[in-house]
Amino acid sequence: MKKTFIVIVVLLIVASCGNKEPKKTNTPTEKPRKTVAIPQFNADSAYQFVAKQTQFGPRVPETQAHADCAEWLTEKLYDFADTIIVQDFRTRLFNGNGIDGKNIVAVFHPEAKKRIVLCAHWDSRPFADHDADEANMRKPIDGANDGASGVGVLLECARQFRLQPLPENLGVDIVLFDLEDYGPHQEDAEKFYDDRVNYWALGSQHWSKAPHVYGYKAYYGILLDMVGGSNPNFPKEYYSQGYAAWVSNKVWRKAYDLGYRPYFTNEMGAMVSDDHIPMNQIAGIPTIDIIDLQPSSSNGCFPEVWHTINDNLEHIDKETLGMVGDLLLHVVYEE
């Protein structure tokens, strides 16, 4: 019966139209999309920024190498950004000792209300506690991939922001976190374990509680960690997807558009306690972690050189730096 009724109604409507002129309708025209010129990310430049950091030696807080690198990073970002803020802070390590840290913030378009925060950690691990050679396990590491790679990409992004200004309505803050990697040595982990305290990401914890601008808010954040290794695997890190799925989905879609799908996999990655956790939990900024996770690695899910003395410049791949940087520039300029 329902089918018959529909047919009759249609016939009646057609009959009622007769020979009248069809009513003119205004066909909506699609608003032309604004084309945005995306700067060309220079992977060679990013690589040189990574190399320069490693030349200082291990950037362990309260060492001369750390102080020298901080001075260089501040001066370099001063060449690119509108405003530089160095956030000195004091915090407590896993062993109860106090330690000084330094977050470095570069501000672009400070007047813009809509803001994106891009970040990485610039310190390096004081212990190569996952090295295969026991003799190396108390030595500090260069942190070429674990730390310097993300900073190198962000420095090149900052250089491009200066060469080709950001869209007028958008502001970007680059935050280089200190004291991310000063958690306890793996041999001491059980001794100092306390599920109420996060001994890692100390600079991010401080910034999330007391950002460089009072009441600071950002639309979203992107953290880079270990983005310089060969043949990387960037899944959607577990906590990133839990706290900010819309951000990771947005970034991964752009990665697919750019042809980076073999490396940016549409899979759920491992749970990683990183700088993005305080940013989500304390600062309330939906933030994702772009991090190389290797499920078949002997280092759990992290690359083979992770927390070893082999995390040096020899294991940095310009193509990986270029891919991540290109993706970041597209995401930012198309916002």
Image: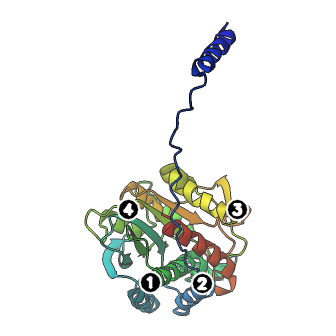
Which structural element holds mark 2?
loop
Of the image marks 3 and 4, the number of the one nearer the N terminus: 4
Q: Amino acid at mark 4?
A: Ala
Of the image marks 2 and 4, the number of the one nearer the N terminus: 2
Q: Amino acid at mark 3?
A: Arg
Q: CA distance from mark 1 to mark 2?
A: 14 Å
Name the disc covering residue 218, or none. 4
Of the image marks 3 and 1, the number of the one nearer the N terminus: 1
Say if mark 1 contacts mark 4, CB within 8 Å: no
Answer with left or right where residue 300 lies relative to residue 184.
Answer: right
Residue appearing at x 42%, y 67% in the figure? 117
Answer with left or right where residue 230 lies relative to residue 44.
Answer: right
Q: Nearer the viewer, residue 210 or 297?
A: 210
* CA neighbours of label 3 inside 10 A, class few (<14), some (14 to 19), many (20+): some
Which structural element holds mark 1?
helix
Say if mark 1 contacts mark 2, CB within 8 Å: no
Of the image marks 1 and 4, the number of the one nearer the N terminus: 1
Residue appearing at x 46%, y 71% in the figure? 119
Answer with left or right where residue 174 lies relative to residue 51.
Answer: left
Q: Amino acid at mark 1?
A: Arg
Q: CA distance from mark 1 to mark 4?
A: 21 Å
Name the disc covering residue 42, or none. 2
Question: In the picture shown, does residue 171 fall above or below 135?
Answer: above
* CA neighbours of label 2 inside 10 A, class few (<14), some (14 to 19), many (20+): some
Q: CA distance from mark 3 to mark 1?
A: 29 Å
Q: Amino acid at mark 2?
A: Asn
Q: Which residue is mark 1?
A: 162
Q: Nearer the viewer, residue 111 or 226?
A: 111
* CA neighbours of label 4 inside 10 A, class few (<14), some (14 to 19), many (20+): some
Which structural element holds mark 4?
loop
Name the disc covering residue 261, or none. 3
Residue appearing at x 49%, y 68% in the figure? 332
